[in-house]
Image (cartoon, coloured by chain):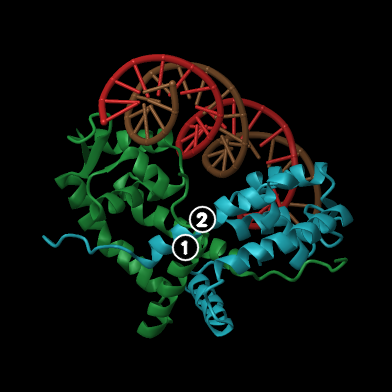
Chain colours: A green, B cyan, C brown, D red
Amino acid sequence: MGNAPSPRPSLLYAIKQVELAVRSRMDAVLAPSGITPLQYTALTVLHRRDGLSVAQLARNSFVTAQTMGEMITVLEHRGLVSRRVDPTSRRRTLTSVTQAGLDLLTEYDTKVAELEESMVATLTPRQRHAFATYLNSCRVSLGDSPAH
Amino acid sequence: MGNAPSPRPSLLYAIKQVELAVRSRMDAVLAPSGITPLQYTALTVLHRRDGLSVAQLARNSFVTAQTMGEMITVLEHRGLVSRRVDPTSRRRTLTSVTQAGLDLLTEYDTKVAELEESMVATLTPRQRHAFATYLNSCRVSLGDSPAH
DNA sequence: CTTATTTCAGATGAACTGAAATGC
DNA sequence: CGCATTTCAGTTTATCTGAAATAA
């Protein structure tokens, strides 16, 4: 100790910077749809894993169940998701993407894919694959599955 | 059209998930210091690039000058940064990390480095280097130009 | 009884927009 | 005059904590 902090163009900082830039671009891409990047993400998660409960979605996104509940209510009022009682546990409500929600995802999927493409434009397919692998191993190492 | 959106374990989503996990861990690491991850980042940026103005810092972090101004005021009141008038342009004020701020950075640098280490624990040195390179090329391709 | 899920209510903080003052 | 920077003021929005109801 006594050492000055290391110069930090650190990986943590780099990740934050990329995420900030991505969010900024996503805001612009999604602006015409009237939903936020966070809501869009919730929709895509529901599309991949149909029938999640609000509590499960909340844990996936590092927010409280109350916060996610509000977000889902907004999406429900816009007709993008629907909810039904879980037959196996009548306390929880299962959420699904509606046809309108699917239409929205279909409409914006291309634009979001283009954004992703522009982000990794200078990387080869092999590098892109390695990049995805690294990101995933970071997620796992950081102890995925938040809040239990 | 008519196509359902592609299944999206996308790079954009992976980046967001890693960033969420990092922020959650950073909150825990920095809690005893009383400063937020965002404030800590501002400190590290100032340490690397001494004498930036509030407006420059704001552009670096994708926030408005007003927002960054408030954050710097908080850090100043805690004695972690100091400000002085730019001799070449008496309108702007240059910000520097104080000795107390440097002490704080020194104290937490180790803990933050350990967090980063745990994140990439499963990657080889070569892979870590490639990872950093990919992140940087993403940042460049997304066309941010943090702080001039 | 304990735990999980959902929801209502209120509090808080972090960001924004608008506007003004200052300097180049 | 136009533009950048800083700061004051007010507002909005997203999140939280706390508490209650319901169900397993």
For this orientation, the residue located farthest to the left is B2
Determine the residue positioned at 36% across, 49% down.
A31
> Which residue is at a point 50% across and 69% down the rendered structure image?
B143
Residue type beneath disc 2: Ala
* Image height of A111 relative to D11, above or below: below
Q: CA distance from mark 1 to mark 2?
A: 7 Å
Q: Position of residue A78 (x, y in %)?
A: 25, 37
| Residue A123 place in picture, x, y as percent | 42, 82
- Local crowd at mark 2 within 10 Å, few (<14), some, or many (≥20)? many
Q: Which residue is mark 2?
A: B21
The residue that mark 1 highlights is A139
Check if mark 1 and mark 2 are on a common chain: no
Q: Is residue A92 left or right of residue C13?
A: left
Whether residue B97 can be seen here: no
Q: Residue C23 versus residue D5: which sits nearer the camera?
A: D5
Q: Amino acid at mark 1?
A: Arg
In the image, which disc is placed on residue A131?
Answer: none
Q: Position of residue D14 (x, y in %)?
A: 46, 39
Q: Judging from the image, what secondary structure is the residue with disc 1 in?
A: helix
| Disc 2 element | helix
- Give residue B125's quadrant in the image: bottom right
